[in-house]
Image: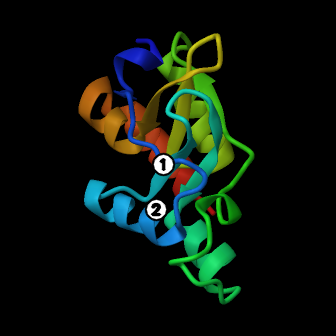
Amino acid sequence: MLIKDAMTPNPEYITPDKTVQQAAERMRDLDVGMIPVGDGVKLKGIITDRDIVVRSTAEGKDPKEAEASSAMTPDILYLFEDQELDDAVQTMKDKQVRRIIILNRDKDMTGVLAMADLANRSGDESEIAEALEGVSEH
């Protein structure tokens, strides 16, 4: 199975000039722990709930004033939509992550693959268990 067959397509995103508070509100509304930062196609980074705490709140930044770009992770872990799902499972395990940005070969964002996507779409419980075990090891 290819990643594009299991990923969540066309994920929500925020622009880098949105505030940290707006990023947190959007994550709350979507019930997610990460949201891409960019223009919807080309990515600038990702912002996670942990990024907000570690890079913004812990530094005393005002969430109503600080831009999302100041708290985001600029180094994006990604895979391509035409790669095998096994590649994603191995990457999640090796990199200790629960979600990965998915791009097409032009490096435009086309989706996000999360553990929940593996559980909902792959149908292979051993694959899900392997990825979860790898992410939870440390």
Q: Position of residue 21 (x, y in %)?
A: 46, 72
Residue occupied by mark 2: 23
What residue is disc 1 on? 14
Residue at 53% across / 78% down in the picture? Answer: 63
The quadrant of the image that shows the C terminus is: bottom right
Disc 1 marks which amino acid? Ile
Q: Quadrant of residue 88?
A: top right
Residue 67 coordinates in the image, percent (x, y): 61, 65
In the rendered image, which quarter is residue 117 located in?
top left
Mark 1: which secondary structure? loop
Nearer-the-camera pick, 114 or 25: 25
Q: How is the image coloured?
A: rainbow
Q: Name the one closer to the observer, 47 or 67.
A: 67
Q: Amino acid at mark 2?
A: Ala
Above/below status of 6 relative to 115: above
Q: Nearer the viewer, residue 88 or 57?
A: 57
Q: Is residue 54 above or below residue 14?
A: below
Residue 50 location, x and y as percent?
A: 56, 69
Residue at x 59% of width, y 61% of height: 68
Please tell me in which quadrant of the rendered image residue 57 appears.
bottom right
**Contact? badges 1 and 2 (CB < 8 Å):** yes
- Cα distance between the residues tagged 1 and 2: 7 Å
Q: Position of residue 58 (x, y in %)?
A: 65, 86
Along the line of sight, the residue nearer the viewer: 31 or 3:
31
